[in-house]
Image (cartoon, rainbow, N blue to C red):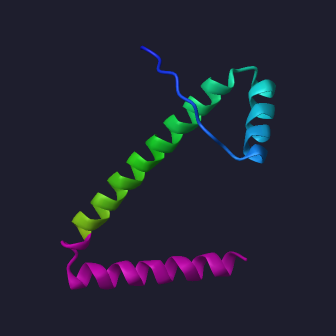
Amino acid sequence: MPKVKTAISVPEDLFEQMDKLARRWRVPRSRLIARAVEEFLERRKSDEITARLDRAYADKETPEENALRRHAAGAFRRLLEDKR
């Protein structure tokens, strides 16, 4: 895949943390930054998919399903509290 060079500005303390991690992992800073951006974008994509599913199912939940979900959540909460 072709590479594109870019210049970025980051706070000095963030740069130092990033630099230490890159040295510890023995990877170039550019690779560390690229990997961080890849993970960020992947997480955003997952969040967006989850939000879309939440919206889709929110419109289709019947009052009975809503009541059952609330009941199940309460039962699960009580079960967890009993385990403490």
Q: Is residue 36 left or right of residue 73?
A: right
Place residue 66 in its image quadrant: bottom left
Place residue 67 in its image quadrant: bottom left
Q: As displayed, is residue 34 above or below residue 48?
A: above
Q: As displayed, is residue 37 above or below residue 11?
A: above
Q: As displayed, is residue 77 above or below residue 5?
A: below
Magenta residues, as a range?
58-84
On-image quarter of the C terminus: bottom right
Work out whether residue 43 or residue 20 is closer to the camera in this orientation and state it. Answer: 20
Seen at 74% across and 28% down, the residue is 22
Seen at 78% across and 46% down, the residue is 13
Q: Measured from the top left, where is residue 37 in percent x and y?
A: 53, 37
On-image quarter of the N terminus: top left
Seen at 79% across and 25% down, the residue is 23
Q: Main secondary structure of the magenta part?
A: helix
Q: Measured from the top left, where is residue 45 in percent x and y?
A: 38, 46
Q: How many marks?
A: 0
Work out whether residue 41 or residue 49 is closer to the camera in this orientation and state it. Answer: 41
Residue situated furthest top in the rendering: 2
Seen at 47% across and 47% down, the residue is 43
Q: As displayed, is residue 64 above or below residue 11?
A: below
Work out whether residue 11 or residue 75 is closer to the camera in this orientation and state it. Answer: 11
Q: Is residue 69 found inside the magenta-colored segment of the image?
A: yes
Q: Is residue 18 left or right of residue 31?
A: right
Q: Measured from the top left, where is residue 81 in percent x and y?
A: 65, 81
Work out whether residue 5 or residue 74 is closer to the camera in this orientation and state it. Answer: 5
Q: Measured from the top left, where is residue 8 in percent x and y?
A: 59, 36
